[in-house]
Image (cartoon, rainbow, N blue to C red):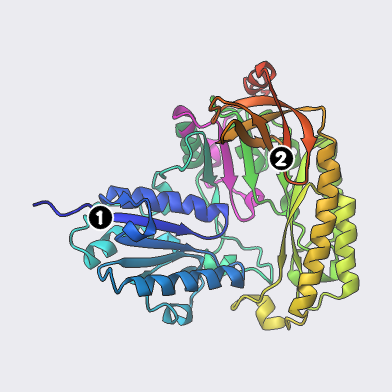
Amino acid sequence: MPAPVRKYHIFTFGCQMNKSDSERIAALLELTGLERAAKETDADVVIMNSCSVRQAAEDRIFGKLRNLGRARAKRPNLIVAVTGCLPGRDKDSAIRAKMPEADLFFPIKDLPQLPRWLAELDPEIATTGDVAGDYLRIRPNYSSKFQAFVPVQTGCQKFCTYCVVPYARGLEANRPAADILAEVADLAERGVIEVTLLGQAINTYKAPDRGSFSAQNPYQDDYAALLWEVNRIPGIRRVNFTGAHPMNMTDEVIDALALPKQINFLHLPIQAGSNEVLKRMNRRYTREQYLEIIRKVRARRPGIALGTDIIVGFCGETPEQFEETLSLYREADFDISYNAMYSTRSGTQAAKLYVDDVPKAEKKRRWNALQAVMEEIVLRKNQAYVGRTVEVLVDQKGDGWCGGNSSELKLVRFPSTADLRGQIVNVKIDKAMEWLLTGKLTNSEAVEQRSGETVKQ
């Protein structure tokens, strides 16, 4: 009698890069013959793709591991593996020692070895033979048929004092341009129309194989050149990327924001509005330099929506310095911000050099104040969309409605009995709230016409 098919379940914590990595983990597990489990309780193998950016994220992972440890009483053959950022930054095995429930604990770069490790733990799980040494060459099991994440680089060497990424993912490593473009072209062949390029400081990208760029490519900056190439791939209709670093927003990268398939949105983290705080964070720019970049971006692409990241309560941040963050937020007039309260990460320079001296209650007060400013501004900016028609890539279907993001990454919902997921449609906005625009479907002829544009030679 054949052995029952083994099943897997993946928990993904953190950013889009981790989500993309989980798609590769799923593909590799299915190469070994495992099937995706509908529920965690049906799984024989549970993979936790961990995040270490905030203490709260780590706490959730430890809590989930404790629950899995208790589940072993009824499922003694359960295999639990932890990958992602936590193993990547565990240089002294201190984190591993806190995870007795984990059978496997490995950084994501070691993913190609997972089939062998699983086979050693459970002989019924097949190995897959040779697997590409570079895990990014594993073809992912994309979670969407029409949208996809495509990593451009891993790691980072900016060494912001608060950040664990250089320790968790290593120094910056750039994928060959040929690999990136081949992955995007393959996605387009299979019907994907929107790609989001991923990197920790993506606009630092340097192609190891610059000869893969077309002779007609007008850009010298490698990241601008990569965007130009992606914009030329037939079938791709929207190009997004995250996350850029202000220090590398060259004039050519700014110019590339106006390429025809680029969405009308830029995410550009500022982190703080005080020059003193920015210096302690090792961000290597001033608020004045950041605002000048924003001015150039808006001059090149008027009407572009802007997002950012901000940390409140960083070491030594005074009330007056926090007020500088609020004033910068108003001056930059962001569309959205992802706000976080600072938490010390072991191994970072901030943990070694500074004291986390802003009380938790004060961090919460500052977070609430920043959130209030954001909501005030986003409502005002969203109300300007009333009466306008926006392009929406539909990725949601409910009872009598569809929804998705506009080119400005505004969430839009409209009445529809048809399932329009995977299509780009025009929606005329009739109501605006802080986090939702609603409207009525119009014809999509203009959208189809724009999506067929080609990059100017």
**Label 1 element class:** loop
Rendering coords of residue 350 (x, y %): 69, 77
Q: Which of 175 and 444 is in front in this view?
A: 444
How packed is label 2: few (under 14 Cα within 10 Å), some, or many (20 or more)?
many
Q: Does the magenta stretch include residue 12?
A: no
Which residue is situated farthest in the front direction here?
A: 399
Q: Which amino acid does label 1 sit on?
A: Arg
Task: Kindly state the secondary structure of the residue where label 2 is placed.
Answer: loop
Residue that badge 2 annotates: 410
Q: What stretch is highlighted in magenta?
A: 187-214
Residue 144 visible (yes or no): yes
- Quarter-wise, where is residue 359 in the image? bottom right
Drawn side of residue 421 relative to residue 297, left or right: left
| Separation of marks 1 and 2 at Cα, in angstroms | 41 Å
Q: Mark 1 points at which residue?
A: 6
- The residue carrying pointer 1 sits among few (fewer than 14), some (14 to 19) or many (20 or more) residues within 10 Å by Cα, namely many
**Residue 352 image point, x, y percent:** 66, 82
Residue type, mark 2 in image: Lys
